[in-house]
Image (tube, helix red, strand yellow):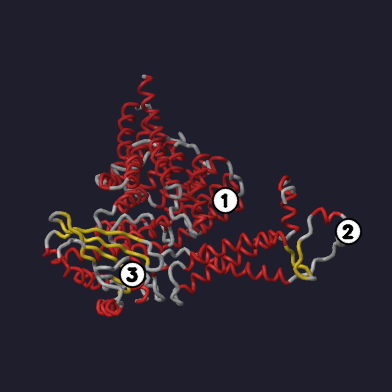
Amino acid sequence: MADQSKNPFQFWQELKRRKVIRVIIGYLATAYIILELTSIIAEPFGLPGWSINFVFILLCVGFIVVVLLSWILDFTPEGIKKTEPQKAMKGKIPPEHSRRKLKASDLIIGALFVAVCILVYPKIFNKDKLKDIRDDEGRISVAVMPFENLTGDTLYNVWQGGFQNLLISNLSNSGELQVRQYQTMSVVLSQKKNMNQVSLTPSLARELAINLESRTFILGKILKAGNTVRVNAQLVNAETEEVYKTYQVEVPTEDDVFATADSLSGMIRNYLEIRKLAEAYDSPEITEAAYTNSAEAFQYYIHAWDAFGKMNLQTAIEWMSKAIEIDSDFVDAYIFLSFTYTASGQSKLAKIWCKRAYSKRDELPVRGKLFLDHLYAYYYKTPREEINICEQILEIDEMNSTYWFFLGDAYHKLNQYNKAALYWEKALDIHKKWGTSFGIPHLYYRLGDSYHQLGDHKREEEVYALGLSVMPDDPNIISLQAICALSQGDTDKANKTLNKYKSIGAARNWSESRILAGLGHIYMGANLIDEAENYYRQALALDPGNVLRMHDLAWALIDNDIDIDKGVELVEKVVEVIPDDSNIIDTWGWGLHKQGKYEEALKTLKQSWELRGPYSPVIYQHLQEAEKAIASL
């Protein structure tokens, strides 16, 4: 054996020849099955807690013995024999190669493999982290133990059963929880000779909870420091004794016992209900956003997230506002509401909610502070500062797909399309690992645009197809598909996509004018200026009083130097109706700049910059051009 070890390859071949590798694989598979079966039968058979550890140690010792025996001995048709050394085998004629026959050992290994797969599958693919604490009906079963008086004052002994009873009553009001009742707890406790309120250790509480067929229990203590009385409670997994959450509340006076119990039970109930809602939604983006103590507020947050993913922005705003109304400290809701107002074009309100959220910064942990720092940078600073904050967030939580999205978005604003695409692809990869879809539709729009700018139309089309699998018949993605086809000169595909776009618009009750304007945007995106101008003129002719149609045509005439004076004339009419839209003011300022009215243009573009929501590369570029023109004078 020593000689073989001098050459690792020869040693490996010798292990195979002596069938040691096969024995190791078979033993490990069998050991895993034995451990799993021991774990399964331990509770029904009343085995002590150290049973699994003991079986594990025996299996480890057995592993060493089996490996040594497999090296020394071999099973042959003539019986068990000592394995001949390799040198002794050299002079023997090897058997002729023939088709290998199926052996009994092959069937055993196959059966072991299937058994291991059956046992491992639920552990790998079961995403329901709360399954262990739910009963067969899906509700979370809870047993509230008597609270232990550690104050040293016997006057508080009455609180032991009092807090227990109050928590049981309050928690029973939740439809998500199945709480063991006070009478049942008292009967089972009285039947346990080795249990009383003084000696209720976690292990004994676990035994009691298991007897009550409850997978979770609450273990509490009453403490006193000076004149301050505190109540401490732990939410514990009855099967593993893992502490899910620890709570501590102060009791101002003896008259406030009921209020304290209400507060404590409310925190426990909301924690359990929020966890269940988050797991049911099956998205880590939602699971990580539980900076609220209200299950009701969190439920509104989920509804808002769903509405945003479908681009029902007004509905998302309404749901998020309700979440904040329920819990005014729900900072994640403030952040989400601000971004939703931006997506709906209501920049002024977006900034108001940004400032309201930022006012709560000092109350948050480091992670929450960084989220608010990013929100503030999104509106008031540069993409470079956004990038810096996003990178800090991702150092703490590299699986946070939302901030990979924001990091890509910041690079997209800087026209660094390679980096933008790289970081957006990371967000998609994270969701692929989770088995979920990225819920922010703008990723698919902007990632596709990045590949369009880079000339990678194959990947661009794949991104749009992926987006449509998440948001079927999304008109924004359909329009981008048409731009992609037109840019490549694929007329047939472009016509099919354009027809689909018009059908979707008609199904959504869009006016003919709006559909024509949308076609103008598509042709403008494909740099087919004449066709775009024609559609814009048709749209305005159908609805001559519509200021949005006026702005569409004005922008085309000014930015492409078709008829700057006419464009300025149109946009000035729009400004009279909509005086505080940053994009409209930017069009006006850009037109004035092209007319040579530099001072007036600079003043107007500065106004546009102040009115903007997030950083706008277009407005920034126009402002820079205006400042250069003034400087050159």
Residue that numbered label 3 is attached to? 204
Amino acid found under the numbered disc labelled 2: Ile
Q: Distance between the residues labelled 2 and 1?
A: 62 Å
For the residues carrying marks 1 and 3, which lies nearer the camera in this image?
3
User: 545 above or below 20?
Assistant: above
So how many labels did they put on this image? 3
x, y (%) of residue 1? 72, 51
Secondary structure of the residue carrying numbered label 1: helix
Q: Do the residues labelled 1 and 3 touch (CB within 8 Å)?
A: no
x, y (%) of residue 405? 44, 47
Q: In the picture provided, is 435 more to the left or to the right than 571?
A: right
Residue 461: mark: 1
For the residues carrying marks 2 and 1, which lies nearer the camera in this image?
2
- Give the position of the C terminus as an image quadrant: top left
Residue 93: mark: 2
x, y (%) of residue 557? 43, 38
Q: Can I make out residue 123 in this image? A: yes
User: 178 above or below 121?
Assistant: below
Secondary structure of the residue carrying numbered label 3: helix
Amino acid found under the numbered disc labelled 3: Leu
Q: Which residue is drawn at 34% across and 39% down?
A: 377
Q: How crowded is mark 2: few (under 14 residues within 10 Å), some or many (20 or more)?
A: few
Q: Are marks 2 and 1 in contact (CB under 8 Å)?
A: no
Give the mark nearest the N terminus, 1 or 3.
3
Q: Which of 264 and 311 is in front in this view?
A: 264
Secondary structure of the residue carrying numbered label 2: loop
x, y (%) of residue 333? 31, 54
Q: How crowded is mark 1: few (under 14 residues within 10 Å), some or many (20 or more)?
A: some
Give the mark nearest the N terminus, 2 or 1.
2
Q: How far apart are marks 2 and 3 (CA)?
A: 68 Å
Give the mark nearest the N terminus, 2 or 3.
2
Amino acid found under the numbered disc labelled 1: Glu
